[in-house]
Image: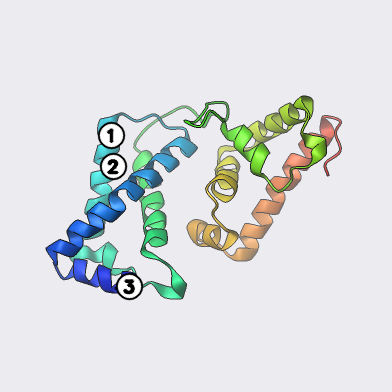
Amino acid sequence: MDDLEFVQRCIKGDKQSWDEFLTKYSRLIYSYIFNVINIKGYTLTQANIEDLFQETIFSLITGNFKKLRSFKGLNGCSLASWLRQVVINFTIDYLRKFKTPPLSLDEEYEDGFSLKQKIADNAPIQSEQLMDREKISSLRDCIKRLDTDDRYFLQLNIDMGFGLEELKDRFGVSRGAIDMRKSRIIQRLKDCFKDKGFIWI
């Protein structure tokens, strides 16, 4: 049974299919929620997170499954990929209720690495000349100087693995605008790095 047929069964009120949906995708939904919370630099209580999860599920079924009905599985889009987009959008909207400090690039994640380290370690701009401590420190400082939206863009693209086509849909802009935005961010990092006396390779 493909994803679209599975969703259709859920929409038609098949209890076994809906139970399977919750069993199969609840953990995935929680994962997407936690990723957005971490990336955006929010600290929520477990009660808040549980509330967010329940509201996310409710958003799928309210209005006679209006949101879930919008899944069409077009262009090979899997249900998991579609859910990721829905959960990210819903979580960002939900987080607007809270006032929190700006995103910290120094805070360590569960794997012991900070956002700056992840970007520095995984970015395609990495080269042998960036591997010494002083240059990495300078690069992290340059990343820190980016505004929150640009850091969020890099995190989605580099750490979470969103392709530029997915980012185009996520931000609701053209592919050209996404390419230009990434190019502009990289150029800002290059200029900052050059100002610190290093050559960007």
N-term mark: 2 or 3: 3
Give the CA separation, mark 2 to mark 3.
Answer: 28 Å
Q: Residue 10: where, in percent of width, then height?
A: 20, 66
Asked whether the residues under the numbered discs 1 and 3 touch, taking CB atoms below 8 Å apart as contact, a structural biologist would say no
Quadrant including the C terminus:
top right
Name the amino acid type tagged 2.
Answer: Leu
Q: Residue 17: where, in percent of width, then height?
A: 19, 64
Give the CA separation, mark 1 to mark 3.
Answer: 33 Å
Residue depicted at x 41% and y 50%: 88
Quadrant including the N terminus:
bottom left
- Frontmost residue, 84 versus 132: 132
Q: Residue 77: where, in percent of width, then height?
A: 43, 68
Residue 151, disc: none
Give the CA separation, mark 1 to mark 2.
Answer: 6 Å
Residue depicted at x 27% and y 74%: 5
N-term mark: 1 or 3: 3
SS at circle 3: loop
Residue 52, disc: 2
Residue depicted at x 47% and y 30%: 110
Asked whether the residues under the numbered discs 1 and 2 touch, taking CB atoms below 8 Å apart as contact, a structural biologist would say yes
Query: Label 1: which residue?
Result: 48
Q: Residue 36: where, in percent of width, then height?
A: 43, 42
- Indicate left or right for 106 with 8 as reference: right
SS at circle 1: helix
- Indicate left or right for 58 with 104 as reference: left
Name the amino acid type tagged 3.
Answer: Asp
Query: Label 3: which residue?
Result: 2
Is the residue marked by circle 1 packed among few (<14), some (14-19), or many (20+) residues within 10 Å? few
Name the amino acid type tagged 1.
Answer: Asn
- Frontmost residue, 37 versus 63: 37
- Indicate left or right for 155 with 100 as reference: right
